[in-house]
């Protein structure tokens, strides 16, 4: 019992220390002005299936009306094409390019396959990658763009918006309890070595130096591959404390296990 109590106390002390360090890093970052998306191309690989898809995509379009959106949709995904078409019609003042995509070749990461197509179609100085269940605010984009003044890639922290199902609430609680501590607490000693692939901004010049995403297409994990390529080229990664909101409808326990894996 004594050993268990000591180990438990040590673990709680470690968690508390990491939380304090994360809070210090967050408070030490310079506030950035909001950014409405000028000079930013937003690449999103879009799949249908989540009932909140149109709401999530639409919120980011309204938050970043000066950005250009590159929506990469599977050729066979008629529902995703319908959702995207309706949003294009509802926001005539925003540049939204819906790009039908053929299936990825064998042994090719499907997300990186789509991002490479978006990179070839992009010309903006900032390339923002967002998952289709992720909302980006003008405040968080401002923090990412500001970070790119000194770093080659910047990523933000995920915060889950809890849906009605209990597996969704379980996922939201896990992320809320771990995101800031995981990504911020080691920054006083160790520069970020990987990124959160749900939302990150990268300089166009850095992507050009990497030859885009094409050299990474065989990698299984897209975020780790991108982070590794940036660091291999001598680039640096910024982890900002600003948050992006993620809303995923977790249908059941099996879906929860799949997401956690």
Image (tube, rainbow, N blue to C red):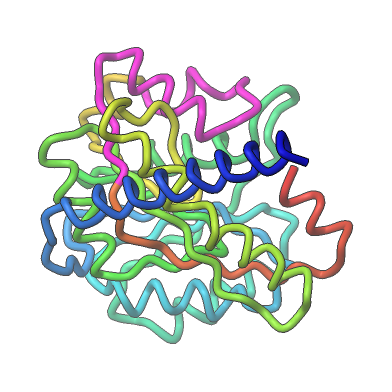
- In this view, the residue farthest toward the front is 2
Q: Is residue 88 left or right of residue 12?
A: left
**Residue 89 appears in the figure:** yes
Q: Is residue 88 left or right of residue 2?
A: left
**Residue 197 appears in the figure:** no
- Depicted 17 relative to depicted 62: above or below: above
> What is the x, y in percent for residue 70?
42, 56
Residue at horizontal 29 percent and vertical 32 percent from the top: 237
> What is the x, y in percent for residue 254?
88, 57
Residue at horizontal 23 percent and vertical 63 percent from the top: 37
Of residue 211 and residue 198, the one placed in the foreground of this image is 198
> What is the x, y in percent for residue 20?
34, 51
Magenta span has 227? yes
> What is the x, y in percent for residue 131?
52, 55
In the rendered image, which quarter contains the N terminus? top right
Magenta span has 57? no
Q: In which quarter of the image is residue 244?
A: bottom left
Q: In which quarter of the image is residue 143?
A: bottom left
Q: In this picture, which residue range is highlighted in magenta?
A: 211-239
Of residue 90 and residue 172, the one placed in the foreground of this image is 172
Residue at horizontal 57 percent and vertical 24 percent from the top: 217
Disc tally is 0
Of residue 48 and residue 81, the one placed in the foreground of this image is 48
In the rendered image, which quarter contains the C terminus? top right
Q: Quadrant of residue 136?
A: bottom left
Residue at horizontal 24 percent and vertical 36 percent from the top: 204
């Amino acid at each position: 019992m004594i050993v268990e109590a000591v180990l438990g106390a040590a673990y709680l002390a470690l968690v508390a220390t990491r939380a304090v360090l994360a809070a210090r890093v967050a408070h030490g970052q310079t506030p950035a002005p909001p950014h409405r998306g000028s000079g930013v191309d937003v690449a999103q690989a879009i799949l249908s299936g989540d009932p909140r898809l149109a709401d999530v995509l639409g919120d980011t379009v309204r938050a970043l009306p000066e950005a250009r959106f590159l929506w990469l949709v599977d050729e066979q995904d008629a529902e995703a094409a319908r959702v995207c078409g309706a949003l294009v019609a509802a926001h005539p003042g925003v540049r939204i390019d819906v790009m039908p995509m053929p299936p990825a070749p064998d042994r090719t990461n499907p997300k990186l396959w789509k991002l490479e197509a978006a990179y070839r179609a992009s010309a903006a100085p900032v390339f923002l990658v967002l998952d289709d269940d992720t909302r980006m605010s003008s405040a968080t984009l401002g923090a990412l763009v500001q970070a790119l003044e000194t770093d080659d890639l910047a990523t933000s922290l995920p915060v889950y918006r809890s849906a009605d199902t209990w597996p969704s609430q379980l996922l939201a609680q896990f992320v809320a309890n771990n995101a800031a501590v995981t990504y911020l607490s080691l920054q006083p000693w160790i520069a970020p070595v990987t990124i959160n692939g749900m939302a990150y901004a990268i300089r166009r010049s850095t992507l050009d130096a990497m030859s885009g995403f094409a050299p990474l297409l065989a990698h299984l994990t897209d975020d780790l591959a991108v982070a590794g390529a940036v660091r291999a080229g001598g680039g640096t990664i910024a982890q900002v404390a600003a948050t992006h909101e993620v809303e995923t409808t977790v249908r059941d326990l099996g879906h929860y296990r799949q997401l956690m894996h």
